Every structure is written in structure tokens, then in C-alpha cells.
Image (cartoon, grey):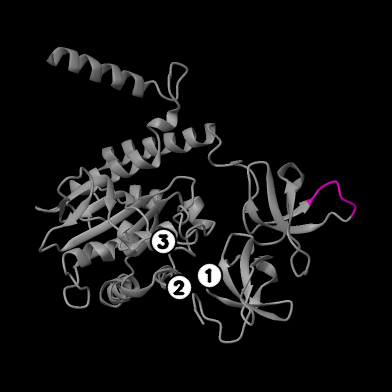
Amino acid sequence: MNSQKTDALDDIVEMLRALGTDCGCMPATYLYNEGWMLRLILKAASEGLLGELIPACKTPTRWSSEARLFTPFDQSRGKAAEGPTNVDGIIGDFDWEPGTQSGVRLSENAIRFEVFEAKMFSKLSPGVSAAKWYDQAVRNVACMAHALALRNLKPHEHPLPQIAFWVLAPQSQINKGLFATELSPGAMRTKIAMRISQFFGADKEALELWHDDYFEPLLQQLEQAQAIKCMSWEDVIDGITDSERRTSISEFYDRCLEAARQEGRTGDANGPSRGRFYRISETESDQLVVVCNAGKFTSRVFVPDDAKPSFLVQNSRLQPADDNPPMTLQIPPVGAVRMWKDRTVRVTSNGPCRSKVEDISSPGPTELVDNHLLTAGQNDKEGEVT
């Protein structure tokens, strides 16, 4: 029986080694992906190979991948409820909730709690079915606060010495600003307030108390300690102190990038970049535009300093205008107040090019508006709810 198990594992290893070659029998991304990248990083960290960047695990601290965090908005809350949140990785003082294989329960005297989300060429996932704007970042922080609440570890009374929320992604994706809005504490405050407002009666009162005792103090602690971290794979790999392990993981990362390119998960690797100036070929005016959202075959662009709406252009028609430096494009946070067509509007959901807004004077149906047409309103603050 043992020989059969060994033979089966040998077969699996052989199949994995063939990924990315002509002999491969599965897509290379089955192995070369962000999930396995994170496991390699967390294992290296557990062995003390990442120094103070990600300190080694000390008993009873442990690490795991594919864990589940329970939510304060669980099924007992009714129609607006949600299920547990799956996280890519966790380091901390925890056990598994009885009756589950991956449900996290913090230890009574926990001192460490770090949650990791790993990305290659995808964004943070959008909201839950009951709240499309309640994205993966604020959801993770809320579930972390709930984990503290289940152990009565109030952050302002018993702050954990080591607590953080990490997003690991390629440097190229970070440079595009793909995670900046979601990781903003101001945006998180707005979204959690909107989420709580979906509940009523005793449920809402309990959630408001949880917010004041756990969520807000935790967010303040993370903000003050700069513990909402967005870091590139490249920087983390450079931090590995063992040269052989660093080289090995770097080579694995290169294979992840190549596997993603082969499956088209990066879009066009040599295609347009967000915020860069281009000229549209085959037009009489040789029009100058800025890309606000780059796609695999077409990209959305707008004419700078123009009140015209954005439009789609085939990537093959976009020629880089290298004489113009890239433009930093801001995505208005949810809840921000802006001016549009002499009207004061509030952002209800946002995107890289266009956002949905509602008229503050007469809230009702939302309208889709280009971000470059929204200008700062009076008393505007990031993530403000008025």
C-alpha cells in the first residue's frame, strides 16, 4: 500500500515538472500561480529567511494557506448576510474552529495575526452578492476585526504586537495603482459604514457596537503602524537572505509570469499602459489621448483637458507619445463628493475610467460618469460620507 502511494506521488511530481513544456498535460498556471508563490514565501519566512520583513514563526505561531475568516455579517443577519472570507495566507497564533478544516480561531493570548492576499495579474475581488462595492480589502479587515471580537481582544485595550494585512503583487501591477483605492483607510471606513447601514434593529445596533470596539480601533492601529501593506513579489524575493532559496523562488516567479502570459492573463504584455499618452493612428488629427483602462484587445481612452466622454480604441491603433510624461490618474473613492455638470454628486461605486454617482440634492438612480469629468467638490474628503 505504501509503494502505491509513493508511486502515485511520483507520478504527480512528474506531471508537475512537465508543466510549461511540450510534455505538459495541464495548464502551467495549475502550479505556477500566486497561490504557490505565497506558499513558497511563507515557508521561507517561517524558516527565518525573510528577516524582519516577515519574521519567523515562533511557537505557537504558525502559517497556513487557503484559510477562512468568519464574518460579522454572517447568515444570522438575514438577507444582507455573507459567508466566510477565504484568504490566501495567514501567519499567527490560531487554531482551527472545531468542526472545520480551515476556519480560523485566534488563540486566547494571541500576539500575532497577519493576513495575506496574493495577486499575479488580477485585481482585488469585488463585493459580495448583497453589496457589490464591499471589496476584498475591507472585507478582510472586517473579518480580522471579527476574529478579535470572538476572543474579546479589543484593539484599544489589548493591541496585538504583530498584526497586518498584506497584498502581494507584481511591481508592474502596483505601479498601475490597481490596489490604491481599496487599501485606503478612508475608503474602508466609508464602505464599512455603508455595509452596516444595510441592517436594521438589533442587528444594526450590534454591528455598530462591533464597529466602535473592534473595526475602527483595528483600522486605526493598522493605519498608524503602516500595517496595511502593498508589496511587490520582486521586493519580497530580494529580501530572502539565503541566496540559493532566493534564486530558486525568483526562477519560480519568472515561470509564474510566463505562464500567465501564455494564458493571456496579463492582457497584452506589450500593450497600452494606464496613464500613458498615445496618439490614435489612422486619424486626420493624429489625436492625443490618455489610456485610463488597458484591455487585451481594446483600451478605454479620453482626451485630456476636454469635456468629451471616454471611448474605446483598438490597441493596434494606439502609438506611444513618448514626448508626454505619464499622467497620474486618480480613482475617486466611494463616498467622495464631486462636481459634475454644475451638480454636486456622490460616488457610489468606482472604476479605473468611470464611476457611478448620485445627485446629493435628490438621491435616486445613479449615472455612469467619466472620472476625468468629476472635479473636487466643496468640503470634499477622501471616503467622506455626508
> Does label 1 or label 3 sit earlier along the sequence?
3
Q: Earlier in the sequence, mark 3 or mark 2?
A: 3
Residue 53 shows in this picture:
no
In the image: residue 186, left or right of residue 326: left
Q: Which of the 4 quarters of the picture holds residue 292?
A: bottom right
Provide the residue designation for mark 3: 80
Badge 2 marks a residue whose secondary structure is: helix
Label 3 crowd bin: few (<14), some (14–19), many (20+), radius 10 Å: some
Position above or below: 225 against 5: below
- At numbered mark 3, what does the secondary structure look like: helix, strand or loop? loop
x and y percentages locating residue 101 in the rendered image:
20, 42
Segment tinted magenta in the rendering: 280-284
* Residue occupied by mark 2: 190
Please identify the dominant SS of the magenta region: loop
Question: Is residue 209 within the magenta segment?
Answer: no
Residue 204 point in image, percent of width and height: 35, 73
Residue topped by disc 1? 333
| Amino acid bearing label 3 | Ala
How many C-alpha atoms fall within 10 Å of the one at disc 1: few (<14), some, or many (≥20)?
Answer: many
**Three-letter residue code for mark 1:** Pro
* Residue 170 image offset from top left, x and y in percent: 45, 49
- 16 in relation to 169, above or below: above
Q: Is residue 67 above or below residue 218?
A: above
Marks 1/3: CA distance?
23 Å
Question: Which residue is found at the position 30% from the left and 60% from the top?
Answer: 76
Q: Earlier in the sequence, mark 1 or mark 2?
A: 2
In the picture as drawn, the residue positioned furthest to the right comes out as 284
Q: Residue at x 77, y 69 (%)?
A: 307
Residue at the image point whose x is 24% and y is 17% from the top: 8
Q: Which mark is residue 88?
A: none
